Amino acid sequence: MPVHMYNLTVEALARTGKKPSDANVAILGQAFLNNSDDTRNPPSEPYREMLLNARCEVGLYDPHWSILG
């Protein structure tokens, strides 16, 4: 699914005349389980890595997870 989401993102950007390197992408939801701060092996991680490799600016938000702990 992460590869599919990445391809959909790139296609949507192309329809608007943008390249991935011109995009700011927000990922809403980083924790793997509902109402949990468990971020081990989330499905969003490979998607995030593909976006970063394509030079997208990527932001993460999850109300149950904080980088500050």
Image: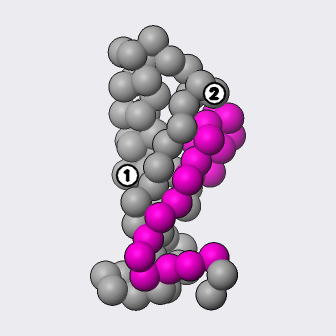
Q: Is residue 23 magenta?
A: no
The residue lying toward the viewer, choosing from 68 and 50, is 68
* Left/right of residue 1 with respect to residue 52 in the rendered view: left
User: Percent from the top left, x then y, of residue 25?
Assistant: 49, 42
User: Percent from the top left, x then y, of residue 4?
Assistant: 38, 41
The residue lying toward the viewer, choosing from 52 and 22, is 22
Identity of the residue drawn at 45% across and 12% down: 17
In this view, 41 is above or below 16: below
Coloration of the structure image = one colour
Q: Is residue 43 visible?
A: no
Q: Which residues are magenta?
A: 48-67
User: Percent from the top left, x then y, of residue 47?
Assistant: 51, 51
Give the residue type at disc 1.
Met
Q: CB atoms at circles 1 and 2 under 8 Å apart?
A: no
* Left/right of residue 48 with respect to residue 12 in the rendered view: right
Identity of the residue drawn at 52% across and 60% down: 60
Q: Secondary structure at mark 2?
A: helix
The residue lying toward the viewer, choosing from 55 and 6, is 55
User: Percent from the top left, x then y, of residue 44?
Assistant: 47, 60
Image quarter (top left, top right, bottom left or bottom right) of the C terminus: bottom right
Foreground tag (1 vs 2): 2
* Residue indicated by mark 1: 1
Q: Is residue 31 visible?
A: yes
Q: Residues within 10 Å of mark 1 (few under 14, many from 20)?
A: few
